[in-house]
Each structure stands twice: as structure tokens, then as C-alpha cells.
Amino acid sequence: MTLHVLRRVLLLGALVLTIPLPVVYGWRTLGVAVGVDGSGDESFITGLGLFALANAAVGVTILWRRPGNRVGILLTIGALMLTSVVAAWPWLYEVAPGQEGPLVTFLAWWSPIGLLPALFVLFPSVVLVFPDGHLLSRRWAQLYGLFAVILVAGIAIDSLAPWPVDPAAGIFGNPFALEGVPPEVRVIGETLMLIAVLGGFALAIASVFLRFRRSTGMERAQIKWLAAAVALNGILFPLSYLTELQPDQLLDVVSVAAGIAIPVAIGIAVMRYHLYDIDRIISRTVSWAIVTGAIVATFAALVVGLQTALDHVTQGETLAVALSTLVVAAFERAKMPIFAFAGRAAERPTAVHVVPSIEYSPVMFVPSDFTRM
């Protein structure tokens, strides 16, 4: 077996390892939706599993086409780390209670401690070397190394402290705890890990901003893809976790899909597939968002206004419901032309300045040459 074939086998194996978790728990989530009893964590595990699978798929695709690409390597490693963390929780709780062995010992330690390191690899590490696989400068490498050292120190300190035993919360006790270490030490380790991850996030965002200011042409289009995906998540994730919008399962699905957009955007940017479509996508998205918001606001104002104004006349709900139905029908009739107009406005062509390649040297046409022909 040649090294080329072995590399592709390993890549396929890494991708396959991330598939069972979202498939199994996606099926369980559907069962819970139709009334089958569950633990309540099915949708959460499914979402993280899908996010890990998306990162693995993009990382493997990049490495398949561009061996040694650092963005692809980090995406694949981070996806495997996240899959192992998420899969360890239900496996220890459902399959391995009372069992012993090196695997059980390792997963009992890794399952509550491995989430932050996996996120550190998937976001700050990937974004800092995006899109060319290199950090901005030596100073940026020193800052990244500082946060990596803080993360490792936090893991080491947390690994020495005793942990509570709460299988339902994914904590099975620390098999590596040292006697005499107070439980409060764990707080120090967790704080250091959180500082490292949050600091890495801030460093990554600053790196994207600085790269965008310095970039032109292709690199700027690559960064736009990542920025658009991050902006989408910045809107949907707070809605998912800080509000009580219903149905909450639907909003969770939307937020997971938005999370998957980040590795997809990174893959498009690195592979340069439809790279320059990002301006059109952003333009259409902004146009449709503005039009949708205006339509929803107008619709709500008309319905509430009509019901309030005619309440003394209707003395009931029949006429109010009929008027609301008429308003809905009118908006259904009018929204398609409005969206079509917004789409045409977003698709409006812009001036394109074509810079001739340095390799192209046109022959100058001299009028005197024409007389000799």
C-alpha cells in the first residue's frame, strides 16, 4: 500500500468515525418528537454530532485535494476530538456503568474535560491560520502559544482535582485525582481553560479583522465567506440560548445549521469553489432580511390595528378572524412580487474593472501598417 493510498484510507476512516453519533441520536430525536421517552439530551447530542460531522467532512475534503493543508488538519482533528467527547457521555451512562478498563478510565476523564480543548482547536486555531495556513506574524504565534499553554495548564490542574460523581450530567468522577487536593482546585483549572478559549476566540476575531483590512482580491473574498458565516451565528445562537421562542426544537435546528455554515464557508474559501459569489449572497440575504422584516412588521400592525379598531363593532372573534384571513391572503398575493423585486435589486450588476495580466502584451496597431497590407 503506497503512502498516497494509506493517507486516503485514514481520511475516510476519520470521516466514518464521525457519522454514527448524529445518525443514532438523530433517530432518537425523531422518536422523542413523536412521543417516545428519552433522556432529554438527544437534540443537543445530535446538534454537536452534526457540527463535528460537518467539520470532519470539510477537513477531509480539503486534505483529499490539498495534502498537508493546516486548515484541513485542524478541522479533522477538532472534529474527532468533539466526536469523542460527545460520544463518551451517553456511552459511559448507558453502556458502561460498572465496567472497568483503560478505555472507561480515559473516557471518564476525557468526557467532562475535553469540550473546551476541542472548541479551541475548531475555532481559534482554525481561524488564526485561515485562509493560507499561516499565522499573521511571529508575535501572533507567541500570543497563540500563550493561550495554548494556559489551556494545557488548566487541563493539568483540573485533572489533579477530585470531581463530583453525577452520571446524568456527564461527570463520572476523576480517575486521576490526587489524594489531599481540595475540590476547589478544579475551579482554578476550569477558569484557566475558559480564559484560554475566550482569549483564543478574541485573538481569532482580531486576526480576521486585520487580515480583511490588509487583504485584496481573492483573500478578501475568502475572508468574506468566513465573516458572513460568523455573523449569521452571532444572530442565531443568542436567539437559541437566551430566548424562549417556540418551537424551541426548530430554533435549535436552525442554530445548528448556522453553526455548520462556518466549516462549510471555510471549505468554500479554501477550495475556492464559487469564491466570488459571496458578494451576491450577502446582497440577497440583506435585501431579503430587510424586506421580510418590513412585511412582518406591516402585517402585524395591520392585524392588530384592525382587531383593535373593530373590536367594538365585532363584539366577538368571527369578523376579526375573517379580516385577519383577508390580510394574510393579501400579503400572500403581494409578497412574491416584492421578493422578486428585492432579488432583482440584489442581482443588479456592478462595474467590473478588468486588469490585464502582466503576461498579456497586445500588439500595437499602427495606421501606417494598414497601408502596406
Image (tube, rainbow, N blue to C red):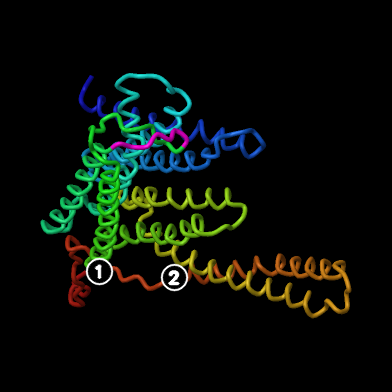
Q: Residue at x 45, y 29 (%)?
A: 93
Quarter of the view holding residue 108: top left
- Whole-Å distance between the Cαs marked 2 and 1? 25 Å
- Residue that carries the numbered disc 1 in the rendered image: 213
**51 and 92: which is toward the camera:** 92
Q: Residue at x 31, y 57 (%)?
A: 222
Q: Residue at x 23, y 38 (%)?
A: 181
Residue 166 within the magenta-colored segment of the rendering = yes
Graded by Cα atoms within 10 Å as few (under 14), some (14 to 19) or many (20 or more), the crowding at tag 1 reads: few
Query: Residue 92 bears which disc, if any?
Result: none
Mark closer to the observer (2, 1): 1
Q: Residue furthest left?
A: 138
In the rendered image, residue 92, in percent from the top left (x then y), is placed at: 42, 27
* 137 on left or right of 97: left
Q: Which type of secondary structure does the marked residue at label 1 adopt?
A: helix
- Quadrant containing the C terminus is bottom left
Range of residues picked out in magenta: 162-168
- Quadrant containing the N terminus is top left
Graded by Cα atoms within 10 Å as few (under 14), some (14 to 19) or many (20 or more), the crowding at tag 2 reads: few
Residue 13 within the magenta-colored segment of the rendering = no
Q: Earlier in the sequence, mark 2 or mark 1?
A: 1
In the rendered image, residue 149, in percent from the top left (x then y), is placed at: 17, 47
Amino acid beneath label 2: Pro
Amino acid beneath label 1: Arg
**77 and 347: which is toward the camera:** 77
**183 and 35: which is toward the camera:** 183
As displayed, is residue 287 above or below residue 313?
Answer: above
In the rendered image, residue 284, in percent from the top left (x then y), is placed at: 49, 65
- Residue that carries the numbered disc 2 in the rendered image: 349
